[in-house]
Amino acid sequence: MVSHPNLETLSIAHIDCDAFFAAVEKRDNPELKDKPVIVGGGKRGVVATCCYIARLHGVRSAMPMFKALKACPEAIVVKPRRETYSEASKQIQEKFRTLTPTVQMLSVDEGFLDLAGTTRLSGAFPAMSLSKLAREIEAEVGITISIGLSENKFLAKTASELDKPRGFALLSKSEAPAFLADKPVGFLHGVGKQLAKKLERDGFRYVGDLQSSEARDLIRHYGETGLWLHQRSQGIDNRPVRTDTIRKSVSAERTFETDIRDYETLEDRLWQVCEESAIRAKRHNVEGSTITLKLKTKDFRTLTRSATLSTATNLANALFKVTKPMLAREAQGERAYRLIGIGLSHLQEARFDNRDLVDPGVEKRAKAERASDAARSRFGLSSVVTGRSIKLAAEKARKS
């Protein structure tokens, strides 16, 4: 039973399937029901997800498999079945859209629903409709879901994590400040480990510490991140539920007219694709946490090297800083390359680059890049160019 003073009016829901991949595996193989299950690759792979029994032993998503098996030796490891998970996801999304067309999927097993105005059509207020939906998904798809219900996306997401698995929690804007006040700053969805450490060093240990600070002081100290912190600490989130899907990745690549083995030349080309990828990410209003360097040798062999950041970014300087050491390792010796590319994945809606807060130098470069973006937007792409871009243009002119 769920009760709340605003039970009949809250309409923004966040729904998260409970240990989705593992739940599907247990659904299809009842012998796994009461056993710790890990879905993932071999011993050198990572955990894609795990059931709640395995989590009791300390296993977590993205954990190296050897660490997961050390924490839970009795776990049963199952290789991912992407097509099966995709089919279950489609069934769940169809169920979502029986309640409202305003559905924003964040991944195969998680999404936001805006149920405002659906009471008259469905004959039940959103909380009732969602309760029925949870029962139907469990009966027809064979997995459980957890639901958070509020007036905005941030609080709905926060609520959905309060009562997992098979949970249903409600959190209104009016009660949010008091509810959040005694939580550590890392409790706020979107505050990663690095940002949390920075805030704690600055004296903001609890969300209540942020609440007691003036918005202008937070903005002065943290820039645009300060405004975001002020709003989230108060439970404020004005983002709408978007029906257009967020892209899975953005990328840019260049094929060279002649193979290149010189490191300095490759580094210049690297900057070029970093800048192009950043421009595309900003154009689509996304930022990503996984950066991939792609190289293709003269004999068409493709090499990829990736790194996952603690916080997402869409800044060219950040992409370049991460991938430059990767390129340096690969551009040694006599190997020549015919193509270089940069990909940005694990995307989310763009907000800010948390790493600006850790390194003041990064913050200055970020501000300069955003100023350049604003100038290009107003006066054209050629209005602001970097030294590397000028160098590449000069080389192209000489060759022509």
Image (cartoon, grey):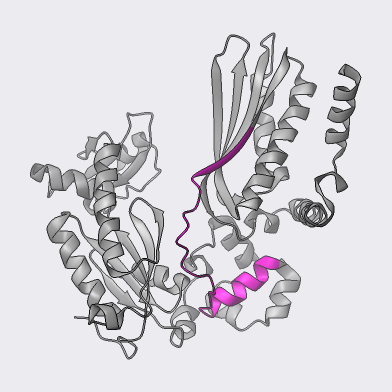
User: Which residue is more in the foreground, 380 or 206?
Assistant: 380
Spot occupied by residue 309 in the image (x, y as percentages of width and height): 56, 45
User: Which residue is more in the foreground, 388 or 45?
Assistant: 388
Left or right, residue 298 beside residue 132: right
The quadrant in which residue 324 appears is top right
Left or right, residue 290 beside residue 387: left
Count of marks overlaid on the render: 0
Left or right, residue 23 beside residue 245: left
Looking at the image, which residue sits at the far bottom? 5
Judge whether residue 42 is colored magenta: no
User: Which residue is more in the foreground, 193 or 159?
Assistant: 159
Residue 202 visible (yes or no): no
Spot occupied by residue 308 in the image (x, y as percentages of width and height): 54, 42
The C terminus lies in quadrant: top right
Looking at the image, which residue sits at the far front? 121
Judge whether residue 236 is colored magenta: yes
The N terminus lies in quadrant: bottom left
Spot occupied by residue 18 in the image (x, y as percentages of width and height): 27, 57
Q: Residue at x 27, y 72 (%)?
A: 168
Q: Residue at x 20, y 47 (%)?
A: 24
Spot occupied by residue 252 in the image (x, y as percentages of width and height): 63, 35
Residue 26 visible (yes or no): yes
Instruction: Tell me which segment is drawn in magenta.
Output: 224-252
The quadrant in which residue 41 appears is top left
Look at the picture and state if 393 lies above or below 260: below
